Image (tube, helix red, strand yellow):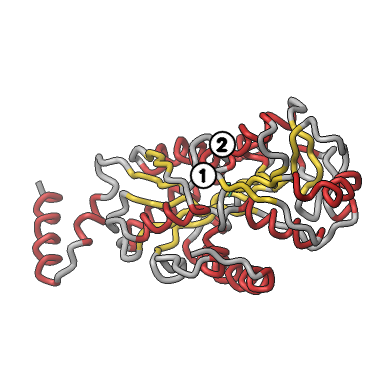
Amino acid sequence: MKHVAKTVAAALAAAALGLPGVVQAQDYPGSRPVSAVVPFAAGGPTDKVARELAQVMTKHLGATIVIENLGGAGGTIGAKKVAQAKNDGHTVLIHHIGMSTAPALYRNLGFDPLKDFEYIGEIADVPMVLVGNKNLPPNTLKDLLPYIKANASKLSLANAGIGSASHLCGLLFQSAIQTELTTVPYKGTAPALTDILGGQVNLMCDQTTNIAGQLKANALKPYAAMQPRRVEAFKDIPTAAEQGLSNIEVKIWHAMYAPKGTPQPVIEKLSAALQKSVTDPGFRAKMAELGAEAVPAQRATPESLKTFLGNEINKWTPVIRKAGVYAD
Ligand code: ASP
């Protein structure tokens, strides 16, 4: 009874002050689920990270987190939808490095990663591997390079659209080998992988969270790990640098955001649940199994994500400008 009286008093005070968010923040999350928008196709790398996280975070938040896949345009369609969603803590975005590359890539992005979101925290880092259809003749990156030079007009490179991780990685690869390949965009690398396996497209830079099973089953040809060190779960795949190609390293980080103006107490609750989730042994083990690494709790915070996102934008903008790639 006392609590009800307090809540009513808070509601009246909030209404008088024009602060409609105060009462919702107190009661958050309540019984309504939280919709987590994944801006890529279901079954893909970001979706896998998101679904594993949703399972454990549901427990720590005390509300069901439901994944909503909204793929297309390299993740920008889903991100824009969340930027414009109701800021009541019931819609969040789970996105990756594309949040930092999209501003340089898109002339009309329709949202600003630095102005239109509240930051909840980072989730996991995922390595990338350059893979090809298993019937491609070359077995190593060393053999692939002359093969590409001789067959560039016939070879295609899949990606998840401009602004996706596969797009960025493919961009770095093509620039390093100074050869342009035909690129084929998909709504995510899950559908792209189906076509790589079927031979409709030839090559793709993909996150290990999407291809771990196929790598273990030797269903793909792995050409290079696109990071400075070999991937812990796939030690037999040499890095690109080991095979003579440097400056094409890219680490795919994932993070969670809410629309701008989501009340701070709500953000704090979401971030606290995220911090508990990234340190959950089950979640960490699942990420490791997929070749990924859950971040430490101190990176699963709004402050850390805000700083990191700013740094990543500063890092990638000149690289993209130099490549001269734009989308409308
Ligand atoms: N993360 C994307 C996906 O989930 C793929 C990509 O960014 O390349 O499909």
CA–CA distance in space, label 1 to label 2: 7 Å
Q: In this view, does 234 lie above or below 165?
A: above
Mark 1 vs 2: CB contact within 8 A = yes
**The furthest residue to the front:** 153
Give residue 39's mark: none
For residue 289, say whether it is visible: no
For residue 56, say whether it is visible: yes
> Where residue 177 sits in the image (x, y, percent)?
82, 58
| Residue 136 position by quadrant | top right
Residue visible at 78% across and 50% down in the picture? 152
Q: Is residue 60 above or below residue 241?
A: above
> Where residue 166 sits in the image (x, y, percent)?
64, 50
Indicate the secondary structure of the residue bearing disc 1.
loop
Residue visible at 15% across and 66% down in the picture? 14
The residue under label 2 is: 191
Residue visible at 57% across and 66% down in the picture? 326
> Where residue 313 sits in the image (x, y, percent)?
58, 69
Instruction: Establish whether ligand 1 lies closer than 8 Å to the Cβ of label 1.
Output: yes
Horizontal side of residue 34 vs 253, given as left or right: left
Give residue 187's mark: 1
For badge 2, the amino acid type reads Pro
For badge 1, the amino acid type reads Lys
54 and 210: which is toward the camera: 210
185 and 211: which is toward the camera: 185
Graded by Cα atoms within 10 Å as few (under 14), some (14 to 19) or many (20 or more), the crowding at tag 2 reads some
Residue visible at 64% across and 45% down in the picture? 158
> Where residue 115 sits in the image (x, y, percent)?
41, 71
